[in-house]
Every structure is written in C-alpha cells, then in structure tokens.
Amino acid sequence: MSLTTVAKLLPGADLVVWLAPLGRASRYFLFSLLGFLRPRWSWAELRPICQWMGPQSFHLVALAAIVVGVALTMQCVIELERYQAQDLAGAVISLGLLREMGPLTVSLAWCARVTALVADQAFHFTLHNPEVSDREFGASFVAPRYLIAMAMSVPLGGYGLVIGFVTGALVTPLLTLSTTQQFVESARENIQIKDLAVYFIKLILVNPTIAIFAGCAAGRFAAADPGIRDATSANRTPSAAARAVTALFVCGFMANLIVTLIAYLK
C-alpha cells in the first residue's frame, strides 16, 4: 500500500506524506558533495536553468518586494501614529523586512518557483533514468542545481532588500510627516550587523537549500510512488511539484523560526 493510499484512509496522515520525501534529502545532500568534487554536468545544458532561476526571476522578486514593502509600511505607520512614534518607522519597517517579512514572503515566493521546477525535472529524470542510483542522482542532478540556486540567491537577495527598503522610504512620507531622510536615518541607527546576517543566512543558505532538496526528493519520490506516477487526469493525486512546494513551506517556516530563535533569543 502506497503512502498516498494511507493518507486517504487515515485523517491527518497527509502531514506524513508531505514530509516523507524529505527523509531522502539528507542523503542527496551528502551525495551532491561528490558532484562538487568531481563535476559531471555540462554548463551548456544548465544555462537555461541558471537564466530561469536568476534573470527571469528578477521581476517576481521586485514585485513581491514592492507589495510587501507597501503593505508593511502602511501597517507600521498606522500603528506608530497611534503612539506618536512615527520617527521610528524606518527602524520598524527595515527590521521587519530583514528579520522576518523578507525571508518569509519574497524569499519563499522565489523558492516555491524554484522547487516546483526542480520537482518536475527530478520526476521526469527518474522516469527516464530508473537505473540511476541515489548516489549518481545526487552528484549529477542535485549538485549543479544546488550550486545555481545558491549563486542566484545572492544577487536576488540583495536586489529584494534594496527594492523593499526603497519602497518603504518612498511610501512613508506619503503617509506621515516624516521625510525620506528621517526614514533612512532611523533605519541606519537601528539596523545591526546581526540583522543583515540573519537576512542573508535565510535568503542565501537556508531557503534555497530547502527548495532544492525538497524539490529533488519529492520529484524522485513521486516517480517511485504508483499512486502519483500512474494517476489519470480524471483521478489525479497531488503532483510532485505540489508536494514539493508544500514541503518547502512547512520546512521553510520552521527553519526560519529556528534561525530567528538562535539569533535573537537570549
């Protein structure tokens, strides 16, 4: 009996099904290290993936950062005005973007895009290459995509931070008597190196790692699960991408919380 069938019979078992593929993720991580030591991939074949994860994702990051920046600015300004503390808008908005809002919205939105693609690719790769071992899969398939995701998250993370910060700086004067200069000064006085470190750890190290390995594990798991692989269009079970995105958000929320607790809990 497949896990998909069990999930239909036992209420609450869906959570186990969502996370079941992640048991393989740790193995793929170790196997992917072999791919870094002895590359077995062609950059010509991976260039479209690099373009898709990087330049073709800039519009998504920009849109998400602007929307989140505007929403966060409006909420913060409204509440701060109640306590006559508008001068703190820059600090509150910037810290909110750095510590939680940026990683949990802009970053995970991009990661969902990445993990869905990787899950579909891993699913079809496994169907077409059923004889490939987990060791070879980690070295030849996982490793290059992990490297690309880590590399692309650096400029995208910085880009999203700048867009969100500029949005807050421009919107705040429209809602209060504070100026853009006051916003910038308030943010500069309160932002610490630790806040920037937490932001980039989440956006560059934690979230892309979860995205790649959730996608790879879910895609390969789905190819081996008859309940998913053989589903018809009339009675279709959740796809590999759907499972991967679910696992991404469950693990992403928990991992971001852990980083926050480690960094700020005293």
Image (tube, rainbow, N blue to C red):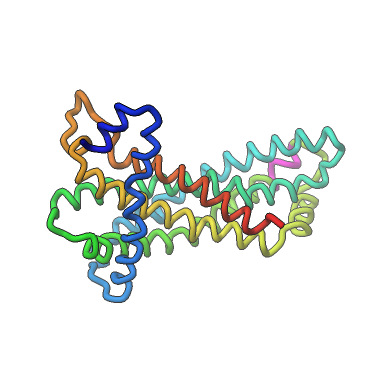
Tell me if residue 44 comes above or below residue 170 in the rendering.
below
* Farthest residue, direction top: 234
> Where are the magenta residues, as a range?
169-174
Tell me if residue 125 comes above or below residue 192 in the rendering.
above
Is-magenta flag for residue 178? Answer: no
* Residue 83 location (% of width, % of height): 85, 36
User: Which residue occupies 68% across, 64% down?
Assistant: 193
Residue 158 placement, left or right of 249: right
Quarter in which the N terminus is drawn: top left
User: Which residue occupies 43% across, 62% down?
Assistant: 150
User: Which residue occupies 34% across, 28% down?
Assistant: 10
Residue 241 placement, left or right of 61: left
Tell me if residue 168 comes above or below residue 45 in the rendering.
above
Looking at the picture, tell me which residue is in the foreground, 56 or 211.
211
Looking at the picture, tell me which residue is in the foreground, 132 or 54.
132
* Residue 9 location (% of width, % of height): 30, 27
* Farthest residue, direction right: 84
Q: How many marks?
A: 0
Secondary structure mostly seen in magenta is helix
Tell me if residue 28 comes above or below residue 63 in the rendering.
below
Looking at the picture, tell me which residue is in the foreground, 164 or 93.
93
Residue 178 placement, left or right of 115: right
Determine which quarter of the picture holds residue 234. top left
Determine which quarter of the picture holds residue 264. bottom right
* Residue 260 location (% of width, % of height): 62, 53
Residue 19 placement, left or right of 139: right
User: Which residue occupies 64% across, 45% down?
Assistant: 167
